[in-house]
Image (spheres, rainbow, N blue to C red):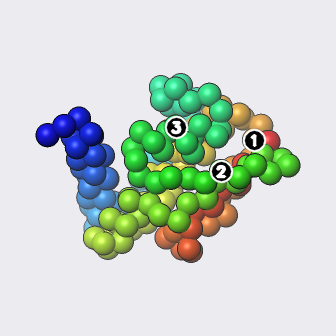
Amino acid sequence: MGKDDRLQLLQTSFIAVVTDSLSQYGNEGIIESVTERKKETQFKNGKKNADFYGLSCTEDIFTKFCEIFDNTTWNIEKTPNGFTAETSACKLYSMARQFDTPSPCRIYCMNALEGMAKGLEPESEFNLVETLWDGKRCRVEIIK
């Protein structure tokens, strides 16, 4: 097995483990409380996490960071006050739907992205407009 195949297998295995945790949290009735506790940590450590992944600006969160996990590809569009990030496909979303788990959007994606965005650019606004779970796409507006 080549490096690319191993990397893809690891990325898919990671998504499967995350999906299983969603299922377990949902079955135990603790998804909301775990999401809130994780959010506190994700916001508290946002800058450290961004530094760990080598991210230097909010755009990097939607490009470089997401490349690492190969979960989705965001389309970035500049706006007069910042940018929008949008995607219509997500591997974690697809697996969570397939296995009928609670939504992964906040606990594993949006809160982490927002925490890193606020850690890198505290003055910016992170507006979650829509997620695939509840709509047709994930759309985030960053206002600087």
Which residue was labeled with disc 3? 64
- What's the amino acid at mark 2? Ile
Query: In the rendered view, does 37 fall on the left or right side of 126?
Result: left
| Earlier-in-chain disc, 2 versus 1 | 2
- What's the amino acid at mark 3? Lys
Q: Position of residue 135 (x, y in %)?
A: 56, 74
Element under disc 3: helix
Q: Position of residue 75 (x, y in %)?
A: 61, 54
Which residue was labeled with disc 2? 76
The Cα–Cα distance between marks 3 and 1, rounded to whole angstroms, is 19 Å
Q: Residue at x 48, y 29 (%)?
A: 53
The Cα–Cα distance between marks 2 and 1, rounded to whole angstroms, is 16 Å
Which residue was labeled with disc 1? 124
Q: Note whether residue 119 is visible.
A: yes
Query: In the rendered view, does 77 fall on the left or right side of 68?
Result: right
Element under disc 2: strand
Q: Residue at x 79, y 42 (%)?
A: 144
Q: Residue at x 48, y 59 (%)?
A: 105
Q: Nearer the viewer, residue 112 or 3?
A: 3
Q: Residues within 10 Å of mark 1 (few under 14, many from 20)?
A: some
Q: Nearer the viewer, residue 36 or 102?
A: 102
| Earlier-in-chain disc, 2 versus 3 | 3
Which mark is nearer the camera, 2 or 1?
2
- What's the amino acid at mark 1? Ser
Q: Residues within 10 Å of mark 3 (few under 14, many from 20)?
A: some
